[in-house]
Amino acid sequence: MIKQVMVIGLGQFGAALCKSLSKRGVEVLAVDYRQEMVQAISPFVSQALCFNATDEQTLARTAPDRRDLCVCAIGDESRESSILVTALLRQMGAKRVVARATDELQERILRLVGAHEVVNPERSFGERMASRLQYHSVLQEFPLGDDLLITEITVPAFMFGKTLAELDLTKQYGITLVAVRRFQDEKINVVQPHANTKLMEGDSMVLVSDKKALDKFMTRLSQ
């Protein structure tokens, strides 16, 4: 379990990551060279420091090797700094380094200098948003690697009152329903699906499938 994290770069992505991790009980050290960013995040994290993370000696004093995770969240403002900081973190023995990239070239370079994982938040959001725009019933979509998707959609009218056994989604479309979210008693409840579960108006379905199977299913819904 991750207990201590250092996040370097406090733009929108870095700041949101700091706040979310802190809410989960993680001890977060937030770093940025901009004093206003450090002051803004300070109430939400365990410690916030203002310094340029490309300064090797100052960065070393934060003991990256003692952190469970180090995130280089530096964005478009300095691609060179992002690459240098990632390399320094690895050189200093950081156990796991996650680096943010804004394009494919930067992603390749970050991997070459030792990033354990590279993320591109803008690209990921754009890919998820595409499905929501293409199919109005898609509420959320998350990729599981390159071959699987987790998708939440609103239950279409033709499924109201039908059981999962009657619908047989796996046989018909090659998708697996893993949960039903139901608004009931003024709150959202998660229903564990079984053969006799009936879908109701207002329900949403959480599906696991590959992209081809999902497109087939969504095409059926739009007919």
Image (spheres, rainbow, N blue to C red):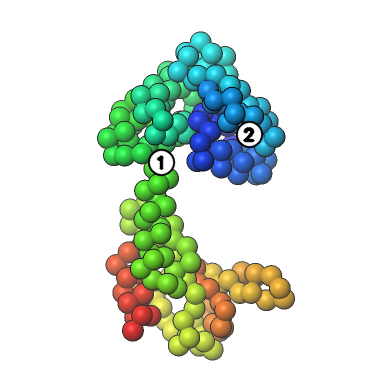
Q: Which residue is mark 1?
A: 119
In the foreground, 37 or 215: 37
| Left or right of residue 48, residue 76 in this image | left
Structural crowding at the residue carrying mark 2, measured as other residues with C-alpha within 10 Å and reported as few (<14), some (14–19) or many (≥20)? few
Q: Which residue is mark 2?
A: 40
User: Image point 61% across, 69% down: which residue?
Assistant: 190
Q: Position of residue 177 (x, y in %)?
A: 47, 71
Q: Position of residue 135 (x, y in %)?
A: 38, 71
In the foreground, 132 or 34: 34
The quadrant of the rendering that contains the N terminus is top right
Q: Is residue 149 visible?
A: yes
User: Image point 40% across, 41% down: which residue?
Assistant: 119
| Residue type indicated by callout 1 | Val
Please, what secondary structure does the residue beneath circle 2 have?
helix
| Residue type indicated by callout 2 | Ala
Question: Alpha carbon of mark 2 to alpha carbon of mark 1: how far?
Answer: 24 Å
User: Image point 51% across, 36% down: which residue?
Assistant: 11
Q: Position of residue 140 (x, y in %)?
A: 47, 63
- Residue at the outermost top position: 57
